[in-house]
Amino acid sequence: MFQDEYLRIIDSTNDRARELAEKGGPHGSGVVAEQQTAGRGRLKRPWFSPAGKNLYCSYIIRPVVPFSEYPRLTLVAGLAVAHFMNDLLPGRVGLKWPNDILLGEKKCGGILCESVLSQDRHTGGYAIVGIGLNLLLERNELPEELRDRATSLLIEGGPRLMPLDAFNVLRRHLLACIDDWQKIGFQWILERWSSFDIMVGRQATWVTQKREVVTGVSLGPDSSGQLCIEDAQGTRHLVVSGDVTLAREL
Ligand code: BTN
């Protein structure tokens, strides 16, 4: 049975879910909040989290795979969100490695997975899958600096979906994809993830954490989930972390 928490306001649902996981919160349980005061995204960026408009949630996941494979969860969760969005706005959802959810070319959501290798033999290793999805935001409610890059389900002509309903339906997709990952394998997930990949075959620029710039064509994620970029000399670079930008965004 899930042990969920529904909150009006919280700093970050990821942090709260982690507290619950440390106390033994079961696989699939989640935290959902109407508003976050310190919502965060990848690379410690702030996540715009106004009240009552969007989905801010985090699920406790206890994968039955080695801890070294937990980073793959970001792509597994991405596929689950893509399935969820595709039911609402068929043919419009795209994924951008590693964790962006797009409608058309604009971002409408993101995933923040955080893995914890617990010392406690009862809790074991676990991960927190945090998902932010813009649902009911109107265009004029987006901050000026995000308007060119961000969108919402409503802005794109999708249904008026309440965050709580989204939280429950999305969980079904997430747990189903995790089951497939564990039973069928990551390759199966990757093939489906790739069918939503908006970057494959396009020029991309990767800025490494040392601020080196690599430009080339995206070949999509490899069998371990790392992004592969082929430069003009035919050298292949594996992107471990950092930021990848489509060439036209530069
Ligand atoms: C990203 O695109 O960089 C990831 C954004 C993830 C945001 C969600 S909102 C719910 C959960 N709580 C957080 O603090 N972050 C995630």
Image (tube, helix red, strand yellow):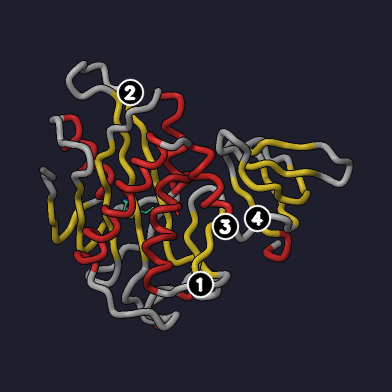
Q: Which x, y percent locates residue 90? A: 45, 73
Q: Which x, y percent locates residue 147? A: 50, 75
Mark 1 or mark 3, which has the lower sequence index?
1
Compared with 204, 222 (above or below) is: above
In the image: residue 78, left or right of residue 221: left
Mark toward the viewer: 1 or 2: 1
Q: Nearer the viewer, residue 210 or 134?
A: 134
Mark toward the viewer: 2 or 3: 3
Mark 1 or mark 4, which has the lower sequence index?
1
Mark toward the viewer: 2 or 4: 2
Badge number at residue 92: 1
Neighbor class of circle 1 (other Cα within 10 Å; few <14, some 14-19, many 20+) is: some
In the image: residue 100, left or right of residue 9: right
Q: What residue is shown at x 23% (from left), y 72% (from top)?
A: 162
Mark 4 lies on residue: 245
Tell me the amino acid under the disc marked 1: Arg
Disc 1 is placed on an element classified as loop
Q: Nearer the viewer, residue 165 or 7?
A: 165
Q: Nearer the viewer, residue 127 or 42?
A: 127
Disc 3 is placed on an element classified as loop
Q: What is the spatial separation of the Cα atoms under label 1 and label 3, in whole angstroms?
A: 12 Å
Q: Under 8 Å from ligand 1: the CB of mark 3?
A: no
Tell me the amino acid under the disc marked 4: Thr
